[in-house]
Amino acid sequence: MDTVVAGRTLVADTLGLHLLFVVFGVGLPVLISGLELFGIITHRPTARAIAHTWSRILVILFIAGAISGTIVSLQFSLLWPRFMAFAGKVVGVSFALEGFAFLVEALFLSIYMLSWKRFQPIWHWLCSIPVVLGALASAFFITTVNAFMNTPQGFDLNAQGQPININTWKAVFNPAAGTEISHSILAYIFTTILCMAAVYAWLLWRSRLSGEARQQARQLLVGLAGLAVVFGLLVGFAGDQSGKFLARSEPAKLAAAEVLPTTQSHAPLIIGGLVSGGTVHHGLKLPGLLSFLATGSTHGTVRGLDQVLPSDRPPLYIHYFFDIMVGIGTLTTIIPLGYLLLERFRFRWSERPITLLALMGCGVLALVAAECGWMLTEFGRQPYVIRGILLTKDALTQSQAIIHFAYIFPTFYLILIAATVWTLKRAVNSQELLP
Amino acid sequence: MNAADIALLVVLGLFAVYAVLCSIEFGIALVGLFPRLATQPKRSQQLFTPLWEITNVFLVFGFIGTAVLFNGSLSLFSHHLIPELATIVLALITRAVVVLLLFYGKQTRQQQLLKWLFGLTNLVIPLSFAAAGVYALTGLQFWQTGLGWLFMSLAVFGLFTIGISFLNRIKTTVEQPFIQWLLTGLLGSWCLLVGFALPVSFAHSFSPLSNGPIAVLSLIAGVVLFSYSIVALALHKLHLTWYHSILLGLATPILLAWANRPFLISGQLTLDDSFGAQAYIHTLIIGLLVILPLLLVGFYLFGRLLIDSTASHKIATPKRRKP
């Protein structure tokens, strides 16, 4: 293993782990706050009790997420000094604001948890607002950095390749920021909804619930499935906008994701297949659909890999990440919709093991999709860490020691995941999820 | 004072707050292992909850602040400090796992092992940062010079003194002679280091610290405060000890790095050469001005909630159901 591979492996492991906690760190506060408000408005103490249980889950995930987030910041600074030096000069503001948002979230989450039984319900709910805003703002600002890496702007380069004439806010609110932020934050909330639905589907599947609890679980599942359909459509819309943006501003990424060797009109969308020798074998080809999705017309021109120097082309295996992400996104919107229809018209079918298993699967698959989405963004930008400006291999530290750590760290991350899952299992029992 | 100096103060302030919070956490870990170290060990344990993760926010702030504001230093730091970084990261992961198991696990024999691990990680993390600080102050790893070893000893004594004295802050008088002797010994050792060993070591080194009037002033202030604390302890008074040790814990890293000016890394890199991203410092200052009131209200509420344990509003509690 050379240092570049070791450095990339370390960051990939850390971000891959951190993303799992980010998903819940953004999604759960929004849903918990909404559930608590619903309980207050409709005078349903059980809704508040469920929100309380989920807030305890949030705390456990927050502990692990805070650590993985801290590690991310440490690794970025010391493993990728040239990247941090460059990005820091131009979009350092985003890092600072992300830190503030995290501080507000951490502090008010503590207050929120300690005041469940001590504040009036409405005052307690108000404490959740800074938590929600902190979580959203944190995700917002750190995603602006990622967007900047994809579409850098707001500076000029001097002869030494250093940024000058910096316009910070132009760099922060770069062209990719809007689509990336909306797509990712909506996807985090969507994934959290599906994971919560998976938990209640699992409770129903175990069939150990009394009639009242079963009814409550079903109500929650219907509510969550409804939310999943709404957010699934929103994520799909945001994803469509992202795809159109890629066609305009990051054509190499889209061309690699769709394995489009040449610029063409009436470009086909290829679903599935095996990538080999610069082309896709055994994939399902839908003529003109890529042109339609990218430009709004089946005759629109989509730029291919021939527009990019061979040395600047992203790896073609991102086609798999793209297909998995889109495929799961579609499936996890259809399954909750199907559940709602079954619940409406064929009540008995809605509680059959196959239906509940499908809902449980949605939770796991949604996490896989979130990881694939992130990998598509990161691998799709290669060989650059800041597109067109800084090569990944040039951004890395000179220290050879990182090679050893690339082997050690994943073991520790697995221990952290195991401890988190074990703690969740111990700290929350199924009865508390259905009080 | 230019923008680089302000940036240095901001970053140092964040690290200093982290150092103090970390020391208190270490004290809590020590009391978990040795309850005799606190007059009210149970109350000390209650101070620490899994929500204590606010500590790490200061670490992230400080680290990102260094990386962004002094981005010219990153290549040097990353080349020389990878072992320290890796140690910190591994200790952070271990600490997170231990915290989860300690707070949510059963009271078993393994709890004692977990407490030891918790204490160890809380020792390793700040000491690794101290080692990074020594590199900035001397331009060498701590094990390469006598001065480096002295700084590390200073950090160790600081950790113990702040941790133990803070957990005994509730009492104004010393009730246990053991604690009195321990704190006197720690403060005395720290006093000797600050008042004698460090000035001698400075005199024989080429560090800019040896000529810095602020370094000399801080050494004198440190000796005076600690001597005062020792006198207070001799009179069986505790109330000023924790206050003094925290004050020194906050001031020491700030004053040492300030005395190291114009260098960020002694003899290798100046503050001005490594400074960049002025927009960040503006944001940091504006952010602190805007967000500070919110944070103060938040910390006040947090503190009150920790102290006040009365519950007045009920939440529907789960009922046992049979299948």
Image: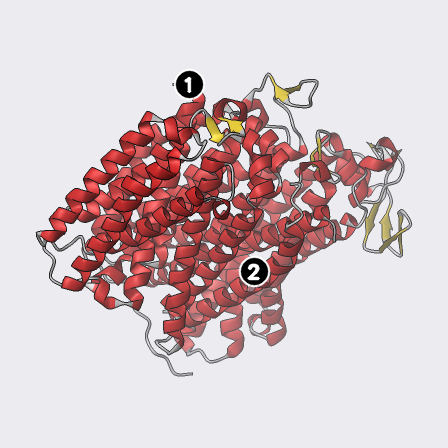
Residue B183, given in percent of the width and then of the height, sits at: 21, 55
Q: Which of the labelled discs sits on residue B2, or is there none?
A: 1
In the current view of this chain or complex, which residue is farthest to the bottom? B323
The answer to whether one can see residue B316 in this image is: no
The residue at the point 69 percent across, 51 percent down is A6
Q: Which of the labelled discs sits on residue A397, or is there none?
A: none
In which quadrant of the rendered view does residue B16 lie?
Answer: top left
For label 1, the SS is loop
For label 2, the SS is helix
Q: Is residue A270 above or below residue A264?
A: below
CA gap, disc 1 and disc 2: 42 Å
The residue at the point 48 percent across, 26 percent down is B271
Q: Nearer the viewer, residue A50 or A425?
A: A425
Decide if residue A104 is on the left or right side of residue A376.
left
Residue at mark 2: chain:
A
Tell me the crowding category of disc 2: few under 14, some 14 to 19, or many 20 or more residues within 10 angstroms, Cα based. Answer: many
Q: Which of the labelled discs sits on residue A413, or is there none?
A: 2
Residue A83, given in percent of the width and then of the height, sits at: 63, 35
Q: Nearer the viewer, residue B101 or A207?
A: B101
User: What is the quadrant of the N terminus of chain A in the image?
Assistant: bottom right
The residue at the point 74 percent across, 40 percent down is A382
Q: Nearer the viewer, residue B105 or A185?
A: B105
Decide if residue B42 is on the left or right side of residue A197.
left
Decide if residue B229 is on the left or right side of residue A193.
left
Residue at mark 1: chain:
B
Decide if residue B191 is on the left or right side of residue A46.
left
In which quadrant of the rendered view does residue B224 lie?
Answer: top left
Residue B268, given in percent of the width and then of the height, sits at: 54, 30
